[in-house]
Amino acid sequence: MDLRDRGRLARLVRRLVPGPGRWLAAMELLLLGAVLLAGGHLLAGLVGAARHRDVCVEVSLRELGRLVVNGTLPTGRSVAASTAEVCTWQPSLRQELLDLLARLPGTLVVLVAVVLLLRVVRAARFADPFVPAVAGRLRRIGAVLLLGGCVAEAGQHLGRSALARTLAPGVPARSAAGLLSWLFAAVVVFAIAAVLDRGTALRAELDGVI
C-alpha cells in the first residue's frame, strides 16, 4: 500500500468514524431527548392525578385470593387479567397522592441527574474536560443518584404498601428491587469522576515537567 492509498484510507476512516466533537454533540441531543421524556413522564403523572385516572398497585398473586369474596371483587375494584394488579376507577385523594409518591420521585431523580449530565457534556464539548470542575459535577451526579435513588425507593415502597392496604387489605404490595440499579449507576459515575481526577492530575504533572 503506497502513501496515496494510505491517505485515501485515512480520509475514509475520518468520514466513517466521527470525531469527539460529533460524539459529544450527538450525546447532547440524546440527553436533551431524555430530559424531554422524563419531564413529559413527570407532567403526565401530575395531569393524570388531576384528572382522577385509575389507580393501580401490584400485589402478591399468592395472597390475592384473600381479596376475593364469593368469587367476586368488592365494588370499585378490578384485577388485570394477566398481571398482579389491583385497580380502582374511583380513587380517593389519598390514593392518588400515594400513587404519585410511588411513581414520581424516581422520575424526578432521573430528570435532575440527566440535566446535570447534560451540563457536563456541554462543558466538555466547548471546553477542556480535564479540569477539577468536571469531576466535581460528576460526583454531584453520583450523589444525586445515590441519595435520591434511596429516597425514591423508600417513597416507592411506602407509597405502594400504603396503597395496597387501601385497595387490597391484608395483601402485601409487590416489592421492586430497584435500589441496586441506583447504587450501580452511582458507582459508575463516581468511578468516571475518579478517572477524570487522575487524568487532570497527570496533565498537571506533565505541564510542570514541560
Image (tube, rainbow, N blue to C red):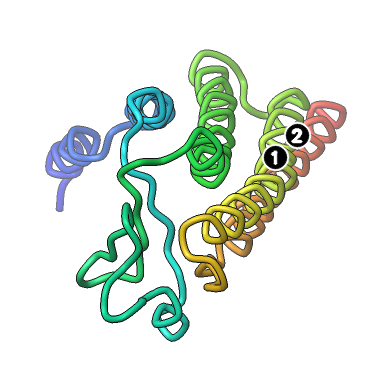
Q: Position of residue 38 (x, y in %)?
A: 41, 31
Check disc 1 and report the residue beneath it.
Answer: 196
Which residue type does callout 1 highlight? Leu
Using the image as rendered, state which of residue 103 and residue 209 is in the foreground: 103
Q: Position of residue 14 (x, y in %)?
A: 24, 34
Which residue type does callout 2 highlight? Thr
Q: Position of residue 174 (x, y in %)?
A: 50, 69
Using the image as rendered, state which of residue 21 and residue 34 is in the foreground: 34
Q: Which mark is residue 200?
A: 2
Q: Residue at x 57, y 72 (%)?
A: 170
Q: Residue at x 53, y 55 (%)?
A: 166
Q: Quadrant of residue 79?
A: bottom left
Quadrant (top left/top right/bottom left/bottom right) for the C terminus: top right
Using the image as rendered, state which of residue 33 and residue 189 is in the foreground: 33
Q: Residue at x 43, y 26 (%)?
A: 46
Q: Is residue 47 visible?
A: yes
